[in-house]
Amino acid sequence: MQRVKLAAGVVCAAVLAAPMAHAAERPPQKVDNGVLVPLAGATLKVEVCTDSVVRIAYAGDAAVFDRPSMVTAPKQCGGATWRATIGDVSVVVQTVKLRVTVSRATGRVRFTDPRGVPILSEASRGQGARRDGHAIAVPSGATLDRMSVTGPKALVDQLEYAVGAFHRLPRIPSLALRIARVADGSVDVTLVSSNAHDWDLAAADLILHEAGGRLAGFDGARPAYNQPDPVHGELVAASRALHPQVIGAMTTRRAASARR
């Protein structure tokens, strides 16, 4: 069963190269920015970005963790105070705001605050999405003239030019959290610039899909993961009703600009 979680204030990005596996013989390894947790045939990385931002990546080839992400800029990471406790059963990484516990047997990840209180959104394929244990669903009532939008300024400007005024929200630095906010109804539309990687998108994409939303490119195609090139083009996250309207407006505007 494919299962991912996204904590409030936490970037949880996953490379879904394989299902979570049994524990590997190699011990976990603490690195400069987090911990590598070996599993059978794969590695899970807990990367501490800030006190409130932790990135989770899971891949069959640990070399993918050395590839830079264009989404979470280096200037947005660093300075976090954290510690790691490596036990026989689990690995615990804790900052002053978050505690991340990884099962060494299964790779299952649990997010809590320092007191142990869950602070997460989660999704299991085919079983819906939840936040703090409660089911969430993408609202269906938003319209182009009454929607709330977040994303890179250049893309938001293009959409505003195409459809007119709407409610512009401050850009959320965490791409995964920005997409998850569509899933819980806090945001109607999230625009994504090109160069996002599998591990920036996959977890939040599953949460959005299970909540009834859609993440897709301007051609209408959903992201294809685990390809030789893990980089994606521009994307839009929205409700299934609003998504084609946003795509249509953006593509019409770009086509008109190209004819000038």
Image: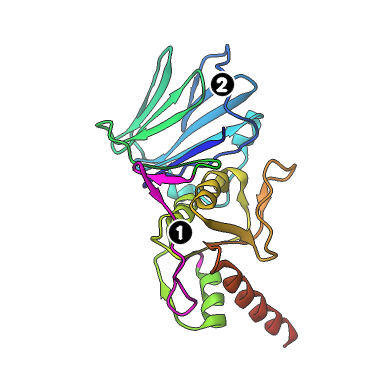
Q: Farthest left residue?
A: 115
Q: How many callouts does the rendering have?
A: 2
Cα distance, mark 1 to mark 2? 35 Å
Report the front residue among 207 and 227. 207
- Residue 130 position in % (x across, y down): 41, 45
| Main SS class of the magenta portion in the image | loop
Helix, strand or loop at disc 2?
Answer: strand
Q: Quadrant of the N terminus?
A: top right
Q: Which one is in front in this view, the residue at disc 1 or the one at disc 2?
A: 1
- Name which residue lies at 46% across and 52% down: 180
Label located before the other in sequence (1 or 2)? 2
Helix, strand or loop at disc 1?
Answer: loop
- Residue 140 position in % (x across, y down): 46, 66
Q: Residues within 10 Å of mark 2 (few under 14, many from 20)?
A: many
The residue under label 2 is 38
The three-letter amino acid code for the residue at tag 2 is Pro
Tell me the quarter of the picture where residue 15 sits: top right
The three-letter amino acid code for the residue at tag 1 is Val
Q: Is residue 42 above or below residue 77?
A: above
Q: How is the image coloured?
A: rainbow
Report the front residue among 232 and 124. 124
- Name which residue lies at 61% across and 47% down: 197
- Name which residue lies at 75% across and 42% down: 228
The residue under label 1 is 138
Mark yes or no: residue 259 visible: yes
- What stretch of residues is rendered in magenta? 128-152
